[in-house]
Image: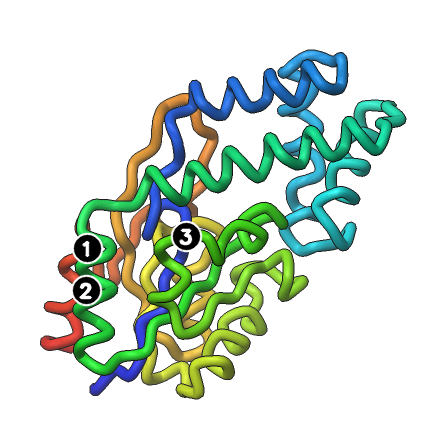
């Protein structure tokens, strides 16, 4: 099999999460703006995240309004703007400071090999809003974000969107992910070859990786291994 494209997950695959303490500080900053507790902010964030991941509310500002509704708050326009800045700053910092080891070397090697490079990420509005500023953006031929696509993994449509934008068929694609959101099985169901990258998280993070449990398919522990799999599969 000759693969024409490699499609990556984002969190846990191309980047790690920021240390949990940094996220806690951002929650505290939001809580201070809204005059509630950080625990309440986290709870409302968890409750609304599935809807925010598929762009149900239309904008970051509306995402914040929905979180406030869960908290029984009526925010001012200034409060919404301040919270939006906090959220954009923390996600920007995550993209800037937490790339996986060897990620840019691997992406450059894929580009030199002539393969197309894609991204499929389940995420809220903040990521696509800061994506163009990141070092990743110019290295990607196509990026599909669930909050813009209005569908999340493992729905086949999100993988098909990536293939359409890359102008490749799924059977010619490798998909690399850490196993969250049943993404690897979703990729396999549309015809891609899925690869699990082993990722481990700070114990404070509640990260579900259902496909990583009892996975028997192709597995890597470092992104640099992708090139070897291209040559041997």
Q: Residue at x 32, y 66 (%)?
A: 194
Is residue 109 left or right of 40 when viewed as pictured? left
Is residue 66 left or right of 173 when viewed as pictured? right
Q: Secondary structure at mark 1?
A: strand
First in sequence: mark 2 or mark 3? 3
First in sequence: mark 3 or mark 1? 3
Q: Nearer the viewer, residue 46 or 118?
A: 118
The quadrant the N terminus occupies is: bottom left
Residue 69 percent location from the top left of the image: 84, 31
Q: Residues within 10 Å of mark 1 (few under 14, many from 20)?
A: some
Check if mark 1's residue and mark 2's residue have beta carbons within 8 Å.
yes
Q: Is residue 211 visible?
A: no
Q: CA distance from mark 2 to mark 3?
A: 22 Å
User: Which residue was labeled with disc 3?
Assistant: 134
Check if mark 2's residue and mark 3's residue have beta carbons within 8 Å.
no
The image quarter containing residue 46 is top right
Residue 127 percent location from the top left of the image: 54, 49
Q: Is residue 111 visible?
A: yes
Q: Residue at x 21, y 66 (%)?
A: 108
Q: Residue at x 55, y 23 (%)?
A: 26
52 is higher (above) or lower (below) than 132: above
Q: Residue at x 59, y 46 (%)?
A: 126
27 is higher (above) or lower (below) than 87: above
Q: Which mark identifies residue 226?
A: 2
């Amino acid at each position: 099999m000759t693969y024409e494209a490699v499609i990556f997950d984002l969190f846990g695959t191309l980047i790690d999460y920021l240390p949990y303490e940094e996220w806690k500080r951002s929650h505290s900053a939001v809580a201070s703006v809204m005059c509630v507790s950080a625990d309440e902010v986290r709870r409302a964030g968890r409750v609304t995240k599935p809807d925010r991941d598929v762009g149900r509310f239309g904008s970051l500002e509306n995402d914040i309004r929905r979180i406030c509704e869960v908290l029984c708050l009526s925010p001012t326009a200034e409060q919404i703007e301040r919270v939006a800045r906090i959220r954009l700053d923390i996600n920007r910092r995550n993209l800037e400071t937490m790339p996986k080891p060897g990620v840019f070397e691997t992406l450059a090697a894929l580009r030199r090999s002539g393969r197309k490079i894609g991204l499929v990420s389940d995420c809220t509005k903040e990521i696509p809003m800061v994506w163009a500023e990141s070092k990743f953006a110019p290295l990607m031929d196509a990026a599909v974000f669930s909050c813009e696509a209005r569908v999340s993994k493992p729905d086949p449509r999100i993988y098909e969107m990536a293939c359409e934008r890359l102008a490749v068929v799924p059977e010619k694609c490798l998909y690399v992910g850490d196993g969250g959101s049943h993404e690897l099985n979703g990729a396999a169901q549309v015809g891609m070859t899925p690869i699990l990258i082993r990722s481990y998280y700070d114990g404070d993070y509640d990260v579900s990786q259902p496909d990583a449990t009892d996975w028997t398919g192709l597995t890597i522990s470092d992104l640099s291994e992708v090139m070897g799999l291209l040559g041997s599969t």
